[in-house]
């Protein structure tokens, strides 16, 4: 049986949790497919959204949660994919790291494109190119699920959210993707990371604080305080109180521009790209026409593939039409290296 994951999280005001959750279901569930929900203590299958909503409302009213199993059509790879999600009452959400709204896919390896049939053509095999292919196939699906969970409509009720290959909502800079409904509040990711690492508080408890309140919490720490963070290259293994305060005082437009500049692929990734695009084109040709070179089974979760993705997978800074922003990278990597490069470029890290 396959493990679930990645895991997606969304924060909204506790009084709105159920309504937001039901909006996410409408944005996620593929029409006409079966949903499984709890009804009077028993799992019940239905293809009716109205029936599912009624049962979830009843379950949520009893507390501490409501949820469903359902199928999603992934926008990038056009795969019908099983997911599970839950929403928690305000009282329950304060005691769990998942926050008020939580979702995961039901088959982690398949979602991460860990097994692929690829056409190599006449070129040599390349672990780096195969890893790049997996990320090309995965990126749109990952961002799409996060966006549909956090922004199922234009209401902006979900202030922030995140995705990780682990099961807990930890420091945003250690996640593989984050969502902010207002790109002008992108420094929230740093402040929440500081509180999670320094004060050992769950992100979901502080996610709804204003930037002013977050700044006050960071300022309350002793001058010179630092928290350890891995994966930021040799020059940055920690985040300091002063860096967070400087970032909070930096114009959001400057932070976003620095993040966009830091997201440029590194040399190793650029070297793998031409071969990856060739493999993608040949494989797509076979899928569309049934003709082309032979395909070969490729496992992209070997130690060598994972090592390359952890070190070189590129970052994506996606500004949203509604004013929000998504930061994303492969689930094997974290966003911390992106932040390190951006903060260094602005002179905000010692």
Image (tube, rainbow, N blue to C red):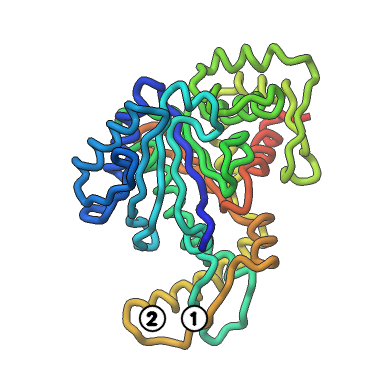
The reply to whether residue 156 is in sight is no
The quadrant in which residue 341 appears is top right
Q: Helix or strand or loop: what does disc 2 sit on?
A: helix
Q: Crowding near pointer 2: few (<14 within 10 Å), some, many (20+)?
A: some
Name the residue nearer the viewer: 51 or 152: 51
Could you say where residue 212 lies in the image, as x and y percent from the top left?
Answer: 55, 13
Q: Helix or strand or loop: what does disc 1 sit on?
A: strand
Q: Crowding near pointer 1: few (<14 within 10 Å), some, many (20+)?
A: many
The residue to which callout 1 is attached is 119
Q: Residue at x 40, y 43 (%)?
A: 85
Could you say where residue 308 lies in the image, as x and y percent from the top left?
Answer: 67, 62
Name the residue nearer the viewer: 304 or 284: 304
The quadrant in which residue 157 appears is top left
The reply to whether residue 232 is in sight is yes
Count of marks overlaid on the render:
2
Q: Residue at x 28, y 31 (%)?
A: 58
Q: Residue at x 40, y 22 (%)?
A: 14
Q: How far apart are the alpha carbons under marks 1 and 2?
A: 8 Å
| Left or right placement of residue 163 versus residue 27 in this view | right
Could you say where residue 104 lies in the image, as x and y percent from the top left?
Answer: 46, 48
Q: Which residue lies furthest to the front in this view?
A: 41
- The quarter in which the C terminus is drawn is top right
**Quick check: 52 above or below 88?**
below
Could you say where residue 319 lies in the image, as x and y percent from the top left?
Answer: 44, 39
**Quick check: 269 above or below 282?**
above
The residue to which callout 2 is attached is 286
User: Which of marks 2 and 1 precedes in the sequence?
Assistant: 1
Asked if labels 2 and 1 touch by Cβ distance under 8 angstroms, the answer is yes
**Quick check: 38 above or below 95?**
below
């Amino acid at each position: 049986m396959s493990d679930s994951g990645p895991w997606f999280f969304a924060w909204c005001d506790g009084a709105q949790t159920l309504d937001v959750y039901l909006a996410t279901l409408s944005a996620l569930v593929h029409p006409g497919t079966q949903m499984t929900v709890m009804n009077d203590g028993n799992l019940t299958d239905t293809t009716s959204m109205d029936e599912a909503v009624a049962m979830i409302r009843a379950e949520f009213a009893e507390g501490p949660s409501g949820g469903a199993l359902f199928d999603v059509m992934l926008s990038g790879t056009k795969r019908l994919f099983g997911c599970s999600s839950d929403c928690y009452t305000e009282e329950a959400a304060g005691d769990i790291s998942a926050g008020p709204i939580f979702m995961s896919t039901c088959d982690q390896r398949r979602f991460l494109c860990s097994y692929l049939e690829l056409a190599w053509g006449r070129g040599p095999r390349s672990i780096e190119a195969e890893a790049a292919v997996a990320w090309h196939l995965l990126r749109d699906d990952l961002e799409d699920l996060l966006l549909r969970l956090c922004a199922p409509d234009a209401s902006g009720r979900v202030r922030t959210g995140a995705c990780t290959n682990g099961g807990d909502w930890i420091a945003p800079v250690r996640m593989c993707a984050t969502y902010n409904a207002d790109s002008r509040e992108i420094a929230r990711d740093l402040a929440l990371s500081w509180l999670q690492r320094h004060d050992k508080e769950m992100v979901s408890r502080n996610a709804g604080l204003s930037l002013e309140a977050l700044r006050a919490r960071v300022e309350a720490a002793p001058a010179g305080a630092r928290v350890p963070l891995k994966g930021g290259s040799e020059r940055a293994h920690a985040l300091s109180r002063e860096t967070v305060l400087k970032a909070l005082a930096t114009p959001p437009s400057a932070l976003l521009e620095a993040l966009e500049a830091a997201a440029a692929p590194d040399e190793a990734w650029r070297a793998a790209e031409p071969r990856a695009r060739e493999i993608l084109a040949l494989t797509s040709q076979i899928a569309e026409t049934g003709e082309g070179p032979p395909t070969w089974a490729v496992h992209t979760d070997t130690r060598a593939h994972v090592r390359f993705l952890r070190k070189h997978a590129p970052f994506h800074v996606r500004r949203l039409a509604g004013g929000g922003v998504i930061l994303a990278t492969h689930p094997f990597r974290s966003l911390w290296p992106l932040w390190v490069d951006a903060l260094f470029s602005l002179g905000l890290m010692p």
